[in-house]
Image (cartoon, rainbow, N blue to C red):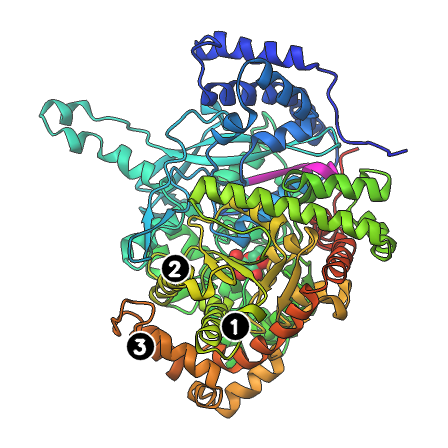
Amino acid sequence: MTEITAPKSAVTAEQFADEIREQLKYTQGVTVEQAKPADVYVAASTAVRRHLMDSWFKTQADMVNGNTKAVGYLSAEFLMGKQLRNALLNAGLTEQFNAAVEELGFSVQDVVDAEHEPGLGNGGLGRLAACFIDSLASLGVPAFGYGIQYKYGIFEQKFDENGKQIETPDYWLTNEEPWGHIDYNRDQKVSFGGEVVEENGKKVWKPAWSVRAVPVDYMVPGYASGRVNTLRLWTAKSYDEFDLLTFNKSEYLDAVKPQVEAENISKILYPEDSTPQGKALRLEQQYFFVSASIHDAIRVFYPGQDKPDLTTFADKITFQLNDTHPVIGIPELMRVLMDEYGYDWDTAWTVTNKTFNYTCHTLLPEALEVWPSKLIGELLPRHLEIIEKIQDQFAAELKAKGVDEATIKDMAIYTGDSVRMAYLATYGGSHVNGVAELHSQLLKDVTLKNFSDVYPDKFTNVTNGVTPRRFVKLANPRLSDLITEGLGTDKWVSDLELLKGLEPLAADDEFVKKFAAVKQANKVDFSNYAKREYGFDIDPNTMINTMVKRLHEYKRQALKILAVIARYADIKSGRIAADDVMPRTIVFGAKAAPGYYLAKQTIQLINNVARVINNDPDVKGKLNVYFPWNYNVRLAQHLIPATDLDEQISQAGKEASGTGNMKFALNGAMTVGTLDGANVEIRERVGAENFFLFGMTVDEVDALYAEGYDPRKYYEADPRLKAAIDMVADGTFSNGDKTVYEDLVHDWLTKDWFMTLADFGAYTAIQSEIEALYAQPLEWNRKALINVANSGYFSSDRSMEDYLERIWMTGPLK
Ligand code: GLG
């Protein structure tokens, strides 16, 4: 007997069809006959939302009336992915929806496809935020996600005829968007600029301009918890929409200028910040959403109170700073407490310090934000004063602790010229955490060493996780059914450690064969999807070998493509007979930051390697490379379940955690990877014999830097590496034009900052191990199944439990 615990609504398919009809008729004003799939999508989404409404109200009421501290997750990014399927799952309406849509004469696929994915994030950090709020709702923990409803999210990526990345705006809000509810009546005023004056011995900020922050609320339904939390994304509006006087002088564009300026704040995710205007806009965005969120929390938790007792604020809500973007919240809460509510400095500091915690997501020093003081002074003069005072207090505290002058200077939050947001966050909040064990250790040993020496108790680790709802249950229904069959229960969806129960089944050949059949069917599905969406002809009978993540030098897509080229050269030169080659399809997915030259060159190279190889009859069916453009959550959900081999090949000590690695392991892919980020913990859990490890360790990397790294040495010493780089240089992948990849080749041979060349030998050596195992499907799948069985730890539910226990000190609603 299989135990089924998934949510299931009592509503029948017929009733749900009626609800859709009613929405179509009374809200959207179309008949079923006139309706397009996009209309049905809106109607069905609205209908599901209605089913979640009571739980949403109850969760909010229990949160405010109960005594459970809430979590406010402050994040510049929430990379949510599509909403409809997830909402249906949590409302227990999936089957009813499928049947109802067909009854209405539509294809489920068409209706689901009508949803445009909100791309309100870049990559790992934004997707992590989305997983976390899903888990908090599923655990029944009261929480808000607070961020920005960007009008344009991450750019839509296309490739031109030369394989270059083209960025186009992502108009995700052009059609009706049924999930976000804009609430004009709960707006907040956010001010900028101006000056600080003294009035009756008190500092008073006289801002020069203000924007109206209007919340757009997204429901965050929990799985089987009966709870629905809120993702509150702020949109910027102007107080003076339109200047009639100016307009009547026929200065039409000037008449809407204030509106345009205000709305720019929530216009786009990460505006280009190489110009001073761009920098200012980013800081405006950060302050905008953080200030609105702090005031919102006061409104929510002290309803109707003119003189709330904000000394209890940290008992009502704890704010998690997702990276440095929201760190301006620290001086903002100080300002609110002192200037708006009249508390003294010390009281304000105690409350602020207790309220905030900081998660660092990087080890690259350039990714820790530093703002010019001048800019802060212009936009937020009162905050700069507060930061200066925080610095004075901090320096005095360090001195009292016996820290020497030079170290105090090193640790400065405010240096005179600039403000280091990571330092402000570390000092201003109660806890700092890294996102995987290795990363947290390196934060303590290197990046924030001085801080960890003085404040060791602040530092902790929480290893990242991913939500099993979206990334297994929704993305991989076949595997989900097999897991449920194997475990005799579907409880694993909310208690992922139960996957451990699959481990004995790895010894059962029949079960392993079923597992292999699931993978094969997923590969066929993906092949069809890739054909439909991209026109690719992917052979599902080849190994699907995937590398998907942002394009960055440290992640080393270059290592992968050089290995592909070397293999191509092997076949072309006859070093390996084509018949001896194990057929592989390599799939890349990656966006490069628009201003990141070498990353864009790498994209162009991958596309052109794909073009040359895929059109070469000598390697046909043996080696294929595909690069579906615009990698996003949707594509991830199709590709991850179909992948045999996943690449996590960053230089050791550079990838803070990685979360793709977790999604692949959970979906039964094998990983080839370095000892970096969460790879370390994945390997520990699944067993060294079930993970393809290669490459230098952090210590080896450091030693090589210290000794003086010369990439050319590796080029000269390894004929296969040399052949591959020479092919890039000689125009093989640029129609004979040797200039196209000149800069890339030059960088590899002279700098190679992330030691791609040094790891090339180890990386290509492990390929024979990989291919030997893949040639034994039963053994491969046995190991892949063991990966699934031991990846339960990487549920974001577990991450949330760790945060609750180590940092937030709160729990589920009673
Ligand atoms: C990061 C890191 C990733 C990490 C993710 C979530 O680069 O290694 O998995 O955050 O913590 N800046 C990022 O996107």
Q: Which mark is residue 411?
A: 1
Q: Quadrant of ligand 1?
A: bottom right
Nearest to viewer (mark 1 / mark 2): 2
Is 712 included in the stretch rendered in magenta? no
Residue at the farthest right position: 1
- Residue to which mark 2 is pinned: 615
Front position in the image: 131 or 582: 582
Quarter containing the C terminus: top right
Say few, some or many: other residues with alpha carbon within 10 Å of mark 3 (under 14 / 14 to 19 / 20 or more).
Answer: some
Q: Residues within 10 Å of mark 1 (few under 14, many from 20)?
A: many
> Percent x, y for residue 813?
76, 34
How far is the residue under mark 1 from the one under mark 2? Answer: 56 Å
Magenta stretch in the rendered image: 137-145
Asked if residue 144 lies in the magenta stretch, the reply is yes
Residue located beneath label 3 in the image:
730
* Earlier-in-chain disc, 3 versus 1: 1
Residue at the location (63% across, 45% down)? 522
In the image, 716 versus 806, the foreground residue is 716
Position of residue 49 measured from the top left corner of the image (x, y, whole percent): 59, 22
Observer able to see residue 508: yes
